[in-house]
């Protein structure tokens, strides 16, 4: 909607240039002053243009083109009261000369909060114009004015807190991105190329005078520490609009005009190393094209990248898209496929941008000027159902959204804290600042907690890079598949509320790790897991407890919740064709020795049979029932007995 207004302004300007030799005034001096104003306008010198136009009007107070061009300039400066004054004067002189003046009066009043006036002038414009497109645009502004009026009458809770001098400065800070545990933040800063000149004068925010760089801050004892430049990524060019993976080990960001780029702006990839961030790499097609790709958001399951693009095949000008990771090429660079438009439940004929997919992997926040809102770009929320269909977007409401552009919103895993940037809030600095606020409950995503830890070699203590897979125990569906950090072994896995999960950590040459977590209700979100994983080398005698093998009470029938773990064992055996294992069954001491030997052997046999039925050669497998002869804990307590009821896997010679 805002875009259509700009098109009308361009039409106005073009009209004035074309008709410059047929100006309404007969004053030669007024005409000369107008031509000087036009030249200054074209060269970007709006101040001189206004001066010439004011002088021209003194020569002829009915010089309608001068009023219209001044209105155009005042709109560009966001001086809407002066714009209204100029447009009103032009209409007073000749009400039929430029009908789009009525439309522009409606828009200017909207940005001043005069929504009844907006509706009045848009209705007048509709009465006078015959253009179908113009009438449609007017209807959209009327719809927007009615929405905004209702939103202002029913405000949402909104108390933004400035993140303070550790993060913000007199420069523009924007586009925050955070890890799921809210421990690290990377953001973009518009840095002046000449700091001394920046302090002396107000510089236009163009690439001639400014460059975009990344800065990072770590949260310590609940406070953000003083920011530092990300030297390994910053260049003389512009880097911005970045996102972090949930664990903070990967970054996708936008760069424009870089060597090797495919279009005007492309999405680049970097990962954390011991020496900082790796050299950025362009993942290439089909993620990037000859068109504009920007503003990535990476899903916490490690599979999907959401982004904005103006590539062909969209619904409007800039649309939201997604691409799926299908593998990795040399240098751990992700390869993408299956690029899809998010569809007309999200995208409109206008602009959609700044997607943020929450770690629940079903709630998407984004900005749009195509859905009814407060003006310009507003923030919206949409949720995906179990069939993968996005619901209709909901405006986040007033005063989160204003007549200004709202973009670049991100949330923590719990969904309670939202981070964004603004230059329209009270601040001690001169530029855009980053703020945090409590997201109103009805606008929150599903809460998510996380498991955070490191992977070690059990014998040497060496930190390991390993693959970790998180599965929903009830469905055997993979929720997350990713890799721990290459130099520190650290990982972070998000756990949406309402499910039980099986975690396996695997590395070639090692027995996998088996763990499980219950995240059944919201209170579990406040108890994130801290976990150190020790992997045992694949050598005879090494064994692990299979914590996600489940049987019914006093039964050897495998529960379906066991399939996630069993399939992990199958996968490991197929990747290590020389490996031979024993499946051992163990019980507590309730019941006779003979009963428990038989039960444990039957349970071990059930696992053995499952592996054979899924393609593992029986010559590589044995099974044995140990009964309660090898307890891990005291059988005098229920907790101890639960530990003793287990299935183990042991490496054989």
Image: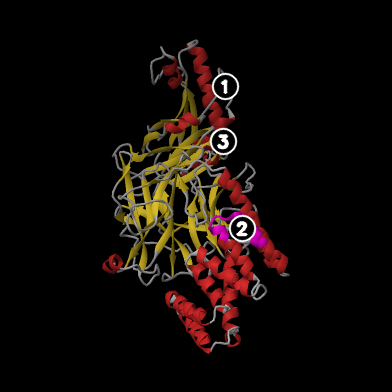
Magenta span: chief secondary structure:
helix
Q: Residue at x 33, y 48 (%)?
A: 164
- Callout 2: few (<14), some (14-19), or many (20+) C-alpha neighbours within 10 Å? some
Give the x, y percent position of residue 207.
Answer: 39, 70
Residue 633, quarter of the rendered image: top left
Residue pointed to by mark 2: 117
Q: Sequence order check: which comes first, mark 2 or mark 1? A: 2
Give the x, y percent position of residue 587.
Answer: 47, 19
Is 120 inside the magenta-drawn segment?
Answer: yes
Q: Sequence order check: which comes first, mark 1 or mark 3? A: 1
Closer to the camera in the image, 171 or 108: 108
Give the x, y percent position of residue 18.
Answer: 59, 84
Q: Is residue 598 left or right of residue 226?
A: right
Residue pointed to by mark 1: 552
Q: Distance from label 2 to label 3 (Cα)?
A: 76 Å
Between circles 2 and 1, the one closer to the viewer is 2
Q: Which residues are magenta?
A: 109-122
Disc on res. 612: 3
Residue 348, quarter of the rendered image: bottom right
Element type at mark 1? loop
Q: Distance from label 2 to label 1 (Cα)?
A: 71 Å
Element type at mark 2? helix
């Amino acid at each position: 909607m805002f875009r259509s207004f700009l098109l009308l302004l361009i039409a106005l300007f073009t009209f004035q240039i074309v008709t410059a030799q047929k100006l309404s005034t007969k004053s030669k001096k007024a005409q000369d002053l107008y031509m000087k104003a036009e030249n200054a306008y074209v060269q970007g010198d709006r101040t001189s243009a206004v001066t010439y136009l004011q002088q021209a009007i003194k020569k002829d107070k009915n010089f309608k083109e001068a009023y219209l061009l001044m209105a155009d300039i005042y709109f560009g400066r966001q001086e809407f009261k002066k714009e209204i004054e100029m447009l009103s004067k032009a209409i007073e002189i000749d009400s039929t000369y430029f009908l789009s003046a009525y439309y522009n009066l409606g828009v200017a009043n909207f940005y001043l909060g005069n929504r009844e006036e907006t509706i009045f002038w848009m209705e007048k414009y509709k009465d006078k114009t015959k253009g179908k497109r113009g009438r449609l645009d007017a209807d959209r502004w009327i719809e927007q004015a009615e929405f905004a009026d209702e939103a202002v009458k029913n405000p949402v809770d909104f108390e933004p807190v400035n993140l303070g001098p550790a993060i913000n400065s007199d420069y523009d800070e924007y586009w925050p991105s955070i890890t799921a545990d809210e421990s690290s933040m990377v953001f973009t800063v518009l840095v002046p190329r000449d700091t001394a000149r920046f302090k002396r004068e107000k510089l236009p925010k163009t690439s001639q005078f400014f460059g975009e760089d990344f800065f990072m801050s770590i949260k310590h004892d609940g406070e953000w520490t003083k920011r530092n430049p990300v030297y390994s990524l910053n260049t003389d060019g512009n880097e911005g609009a970045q996102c972090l993976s949930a664990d903070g080990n990967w970054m996708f960001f936008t760069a424009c005009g870089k060597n090797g780029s495919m279009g005007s702006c492309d999405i680049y990839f970097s990962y954390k190393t011991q020496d900082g961030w790796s050299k950025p790499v362009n993942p290439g097609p089909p993620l990037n094209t000859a068109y504009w790709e920007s503003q990535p958001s990476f899903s916490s399951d490690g599979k999907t990248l959401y982004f904005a693009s103006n590539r062909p095949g969209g619904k409007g000008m800039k649309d939201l898209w997604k691409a799926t990771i299908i593998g990795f090429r040399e240098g751990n660079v992700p390869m993408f496929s299956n690029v899809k438009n998010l569809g007309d439940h999200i995208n409109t004929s206008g602009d959609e941008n700044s997607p943020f997919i929450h770690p629940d992997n079903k709630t998407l926040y984004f900005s749009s000027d195509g859905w009814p809102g407060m003006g310009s770009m507003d923030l919206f929320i949409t949720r995906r159902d179990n069939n993968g269909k996005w619901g209709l977007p909901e405006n986040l409401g007033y005063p989160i959204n204003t007549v200004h552009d709202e973009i670049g919103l991100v949330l923590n895993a719990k969904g309670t804290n939202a981070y964004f940037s603004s230059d329209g809030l009270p601040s001690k600095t001169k530029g855009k600042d980053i703020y945090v606020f409590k997201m109103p409950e009805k606008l929150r995503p599903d809460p998510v907690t996380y498991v955070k830890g490191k992977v070690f070699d059990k014998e040497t203590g060496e930190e390991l890079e390993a693959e970790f897979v998180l599965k929903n125990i009830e469905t055997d569906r993979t929720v997350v598949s990713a890799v721990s950090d290459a130099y520190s072994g650290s990982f972070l896995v998000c756990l949406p509320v309402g499910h039980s999960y099986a975690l396996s950590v695997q590395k070639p040459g090692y027995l996998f790790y088996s763990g499980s977590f219950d995240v059944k209700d919201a209170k579990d979100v406040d108890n994130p897991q801290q976990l150190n994983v020790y992997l045992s080398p694949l050598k005879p005698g090494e064994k692990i407890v299979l914590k996600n093998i489940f049987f019914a009470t006093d039964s050897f029938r495998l529960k379906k919740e066991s399939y996630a773990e069993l399939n992990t064992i199958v996968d490991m055996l197929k990747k290590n064709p020389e490996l031979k294992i024993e499946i051992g069954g163990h019980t507590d001491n309730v019941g006779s020795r003979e009963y428990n030997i038989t039960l444990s052997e039957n349970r071990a046999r059930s696992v053995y049979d499952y592996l054979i039925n899924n393609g593992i050669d029986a010559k590589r497998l044995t099974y044995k029932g140990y009964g309660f002869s090898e307890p891990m804990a005291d059988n005098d307590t229920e907790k101890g007995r639960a530990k003793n009821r287990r299935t183990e896997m042991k490496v054989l010679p």
